[in-house]
Image (tube, helix red, strand yellow):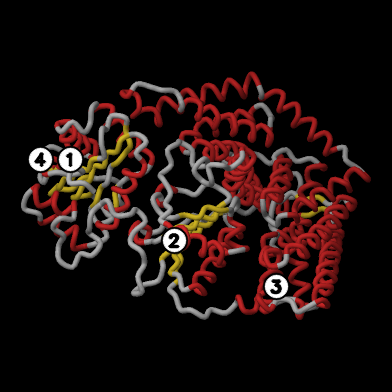
């Protein structure tokens, strides 16, 4: 960086004299920028700093605060430094910060902004550098240290802040370092399979990999120091990566989650090539995580799918919890348990009916969140946190007017669109600080409420009612055709978007269960169990057609299939999609058709064979599943056998299972 980036006039070694909050600290340091002509409008700049701070705390472990922003009120990239003896809270997990860096970049100056941030982050990893800053006797010394003109002893990496944002190239003393994030709509199977696949490929390539699976049970964030030290980033996701700005300024490969499962070695090679060429990513400039979650050339259809999958991924845990509690309530208390009085008013500790009512009513409350959560997180996928309020409001309106699942989809898209529209309006600088917490929620909730109550809600409610009546009237050949379609959708992409559409359609009917909607749920779950069970059976009866790794995966697929986790078949489809996917679809179509023909019903949205006692016509239901598994197994064995006859199969798969190069692989 040039010597003008920070000077002694931009250093305050007694910050606590004039500041005890992060807002006051930013103002004190910003005043120094104003005095030097680096900032033209103090209040406007501070509003931009506050807006960035509202998105995510800027405190780091180790007593460091890095408030920063791009602003139209900044004339040139500038860094100010303050030292506080008492500490100032910037939201870091380990407590207040005594070293505060205020970074200001002109609007649109992404490269400068990222260069300062990433290079400073590397310096702060060095304890010698931070210790020297804490001991600096005067402002001139501190400015010189930050510029790299007088680095402390044994402090490698504390050079000029203008060094490349991606970090120094890895030398022979350490392996290439990669951090990765994996996430899928449900956050269950694809997420962790992708993580494991990347780990194996990294081990084989001699790469040091740290992965952050963003699963449905929550996730452990990568250590900021690990991110700062990484040479490159792999993002494998079908829903927006949470806190994605952490990875800005690094060579990045951004792909769908299945790419990490199917071709992890290619992704690692690709990101290494990007690092060698010095390619880096810029920080997101728009308000939406989806627009920055993939290539800027993504089609609207791709973005729409990502938005919808975001809503579905957050909805699934409510589906599982609420639906299974409701099903248990019926199992224990009988089919009239829905008529029981509120357990808050009448509960008998020794009466099993009261316990059944407790389960049923608790599940009903959890289930009531389905549509609002779906709408809220579709809007979140489009517009980040500002979309949550109008999304939840619109989803609740959809429930109120009986617009159901379709109403929730519409409400989420409307809410996200309204927020994005509001964010494009130019507003006075004085209002920017209150936009995320007051103005946007107020205006967007009012607009979405108006649209859902008076414009689009009633037509959607009529369509939902017509769909329910149609399902209720399905009999004979029509029901069988629907079962075939559901089976094909569940087995085409094995947990991907088409699978989730079919599943969401089935779950949506459980909010207002009828005989038709219960049949749809039964057919959907039965078909989804077929692919992993078929692959498990195929590896058992004709193991020589599969690699050693696939035979091991087959053992796990028994449990995954029995639990209705369709993703259990993904390792097989990834290795041989042209044989596994058609076979799975054939079996799923048979099972879906037979389930509908037998009139099987299901009130639980998940559970596999473990909820068979809650299924109408349970024996015929198992027959339908067994028939589909037999068909899928026969087809995949036939297709693989034909390939085997024309040449040896799977040799590469056996070799791919060996780790020949030692490397450290950790999981966050």
Label 2 Cα crowd, 10 Å radius (few <14 / some 14-19 / many 20+): many
* Of 298 and 46, the residue lying toward us: 298
Looking at the image, is mark 4 or mark 2 earlier in the sequence?
Answer: 4
Residue at (23, 48) in percent of width and height: 1
Looking at the image, is mark 1 or mark 2 earlier in the sequence?
Answer: 1
Tell us which disc is closer to us: 3 or 1. 3
* Of 376 and 396, the residue lying toward us: 376
168 shown above or below 31: below
Give the x, y percent position of residue 473: 87, 37
The disc label shown at residue 179, or none? 2
Residue at (40, 54) in percent of width and height: 250
Looking at the image, is mark 2 or mark 3 earlier in the sequence?
Answer: 2
In the image, taking residue 554 as reference, residue 94 lies left or right, namely left
Q: Quadrant of the C terminus?
A: bottom left
Residue 408 seen anywhere in this rendered image of the structure? yes
Residue at (25, 61) in percent of width and height: 157
Which residue in the protein does label 4 denote? Answer: 17
Looking at the image, is mark 3 or mark 4 earlier in the sequence?
Answer: 4
Element assignment for label 2: strand
**Number of on-image labels:** 4
Residue 541 seen anywhere in this rendered image of the structure? no
Residue 526, quarter of the rendered image: bottom right
The disc label shown at residue 554, or none? 3
């Amino acid at each position: 960086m040039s010597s003008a980036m920070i000077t002694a006039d931009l250093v305050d070694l007694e910050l606590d004299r004039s500041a005890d909050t992060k807002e006051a600290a930013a103002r004190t340091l910003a005043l120094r920028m104003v005095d030097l002509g680096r900032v033209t409008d103090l209040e406007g700049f501070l509003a931009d700093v506050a807006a960035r701070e509202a998105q995510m705390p800027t405190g780091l472990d180790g007593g460091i605060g890095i408030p920063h922003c791009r602003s139209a009120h900044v004339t040139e990239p500038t860094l100010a430094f303050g030292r506080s003896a008492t500490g100032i809270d910037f939201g870091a997990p380990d407590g207040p910060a005594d070293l505060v860096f205020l970074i200001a970049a002109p609007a649109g100056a992404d490269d400068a902004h990222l260069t300062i941030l990433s290079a400073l982050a590397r310096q702060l990893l060095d304890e010698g550098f931070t210790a020297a800053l804490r001991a600096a006797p005067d402002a001139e010394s501190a400015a010189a240290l930050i510029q790299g003109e007088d680095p402390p002893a044994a402090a490698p990496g504390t050079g000029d802040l203008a060094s490349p944002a991606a970090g120094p190239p890895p030398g022979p003393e350490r392996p290439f370092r990669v951090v990765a994030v994996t996430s899928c709509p449900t956050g269950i199977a694809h997420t962790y399979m992708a993580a494991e696949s990347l780990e194996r490929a990294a081990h084989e390539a001699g790469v040091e990999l740290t992965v952050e699976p963003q699963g449905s049970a929550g996730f452990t964030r990568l250590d900021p120091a690990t991110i700062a030290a990484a040479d490159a980033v792999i993002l494998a996701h079908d829903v927006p990566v949470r806190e994605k700005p952490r990875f800005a300024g690094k060579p990045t490969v951004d792909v769908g989650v299945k790419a990490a499962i199917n071709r992890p070695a290619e992704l690692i090679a690709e990101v290494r090539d990007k690092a060698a060429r010095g390619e880096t990513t810029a920080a997101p400039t728009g308000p939406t995580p989806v627009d920055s979650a993939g290539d800027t050339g993504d089609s609207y259809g791709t973005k729409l799918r990502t938005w919808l999958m975001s809503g579905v991924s957050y909805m699934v845990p409510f589906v599982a919890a609420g639906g299974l509690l409701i099903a248990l309530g019926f199992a224990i208390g009988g089919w009239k348990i829905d008529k029981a009085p509120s357990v808050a008013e009448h509960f008998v500790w020794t009466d099993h009916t009261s316990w059944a009512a407790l389960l049923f009513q608790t599940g009903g409350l959890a289930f009531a969140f389905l549509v609002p959560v779906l709408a809220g997180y579709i809007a979140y996928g489009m517009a980040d946190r500002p979309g949550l309020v109008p999304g939840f409001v619109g989803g609740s309106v959809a429930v109120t007017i009986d617009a159901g699942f379709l109403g929730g989809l519409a409400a989420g898209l409307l809410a996200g669109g309204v927020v994005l529209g509001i964010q494009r309006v130019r507003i006075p600088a004085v209002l920017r600080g209150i936009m995320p917490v007051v103005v946007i929620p107020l205006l967007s909730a009012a607009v979405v409420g108006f649209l859902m109550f008076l414009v689009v809600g009633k037509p959607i409610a009529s369509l939902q009612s017509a769909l329910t009546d149609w399902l209720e009237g399905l009999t004979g050949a029509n029901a069988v055709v629907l079962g075939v379609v559901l089976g094909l959708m569940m087995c085409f992409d094995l947990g991907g978007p088409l699978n989730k559409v079919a599943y969401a359609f089935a779950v949506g009917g459980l909010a207002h269960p009828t005989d038709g909607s219960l049949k749809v749920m039964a057919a959907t779950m039965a078909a989804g169990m077929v692919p992993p069970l078929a692959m498990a059976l195929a590896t058992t009866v004709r193991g020589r057609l599969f690699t050693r790794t696939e035979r091991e995966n087959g053992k796990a697929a028994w449990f995954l299939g029995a639990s209705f986790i369709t993703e259990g078949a993904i390792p097989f489809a990834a290795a041989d999609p042209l044989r596994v996917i058609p076979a799975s679809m054939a079996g799923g179509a048979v099972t879906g058709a037979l389930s509908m023909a037998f009139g099987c019903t299901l009130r639980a949205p998940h559970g596999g064979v473990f909820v068979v006692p809650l299924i109408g016509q349970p024996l015929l239901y198992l027959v339908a599943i067994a028939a589909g598994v037999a068909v899928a197994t026969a087809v995949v064995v036939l297709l693989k056998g034909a390939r085997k006859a024309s040449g040896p199969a799977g040799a590469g798969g056996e070799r791919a299972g060996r780790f020949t190069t030692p490397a450290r692989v950790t999981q966050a």
